[in-house]
Amino acid sequence: MRVLLISNGYGEDAMAAVLAKELVKTVKVEALPTVGPGKSYAGICDVVGPRGKLASEGHRKIGSLLKDFQSGLAVTAVKHVKFMRDQRGRWDKIVTVGDMIGPLLAFAGGQKVDLHIDVYNSGFARHYSTIEKQILKRTVKKVLCRDDILAGALRAIDVDAGFAGNLMMDTVPTLDFDVSSLVQDKTAVTLLPGSREGAGKLFQMQMDAISRLSSKYPLTLFVPVAPSVELDRLLKRANLKRVDGELLGNAHLAIAATADGTKVHFFDKGIGTLAKGSLFVVGQQGTAIFQSAGLGTPVIAIVADDSRKSRVQRNERLLGDSRISTEQDVGMLARKMEMFLSDPKTTKQRGKVGIERVGPPGALDAAVRIIVNG
């Protein structure tokens, strides 16, 4: 059996790659990432089809769609459709991970999706529109939703839909060692610089906010580094100096320190381990923020100036009290951090909301069974 995985976005690539890793044990897998080079699939399966690059880097912001069209989104989409049409009959099953782009792409290419795994919508914050319901009914044979609220809405119009867990929580990157020895009597906080071009600037702002608090609150900082981000660039941007110390494993990349001696530990990804070991997580909106909240760790989401207000509000509704938002302002970020640091008991209580809202793992095993045996 030959299976095609279509993923639409950097976070979606990472989730689909974990699914691919399970599938390749029994079937032949090829991946078509619609955005970027698809680095998440490296060493797991072949990447096929034309490559596309978005000016927005996948961020849904004000004017991002126009910028993406100006940078060649439409041309890339046409190439994707042509590729799908030219390859009809190549795959026994087609699986899409993400939003509606994958099903629409397959449909435009003259093919139907066997399984769509929705990692975008939520019954707590974003229901399917009438148009989206009809798209799924026409283009997809079966849907795995993020919750049973959404699955029920699709079943009501005779779409084969179910809920078996959230794929996002099946695919949380973890480390193969314990980080508690790095914390001792301090409070651990995880900072997410992100994976895009603005990572250095974002990390500098996070560290500037930390510098306003570290004399009052003894801290240990954890920083997962995405493959697309240069560690030395982060160190230079935040004016951090490497220090000697025992690294816990290969994924423990480096140890640095601020001017007041606050230790900053850098890791090769591993948000699952780091979030669980932290009082809270700070970063821009993205997959790692949702995964952290889903693990029970409250989050501070840094909202870009050009973010769509409707999307920010939707994510706030979804995560409830487990998330607070802040603008890209050092002073405001420091105040939000201190709110969490000054009352750790209440902060931990906030985390329970995220577990409920994001949902449990389980979709990965269900998807494998459906694809291989269905």
Image (cartoon, rainbow, N blue to C red):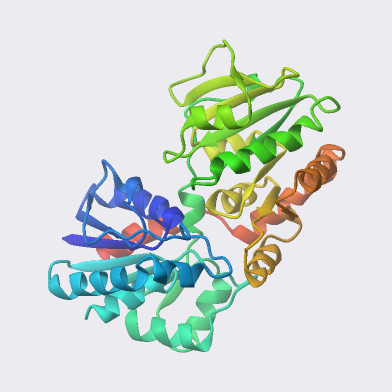
Q: In this view, does 353 lie to the left or right of 161?
A: right
Q: Position of residue 315 (x, y in %)?
A: 65, 64
- Above or below for 245 versus 294: above
User: Which image quadrant for residue 122?
Assistant: bottom right
Q: In this view, does 321 lie to the left or right of 71?
A: right
- Above or below for 222 versus 18: above
Q: Position of residue 88 (x, y in %)?
A: 14, 74
Q: Where is residue 253 in the image (x, y as percent from the top left)?
A: 48, 24
Q: Is residue 163 left or right of residue 333?
A: left
- Above or below for 300 versus 146: above
Of the pair 222 and 367, the residue shown nearer to us: 222
The quadrant in which the C terminus is found is bottom left
Residue 79 seen in render: yes
User: Which image quadrant for residue 149?
Assistant: bottom right
Of the pair 129 and 284, the residue shown nearer to us: 284
Residue at (58, 33) in percent of width and height: 223
Of the pair 64 and 128, the residue shown nearer to us: 64
Residue at (26, 68) in percent of width and height: 94
- Above or below for 5 versus 157: above
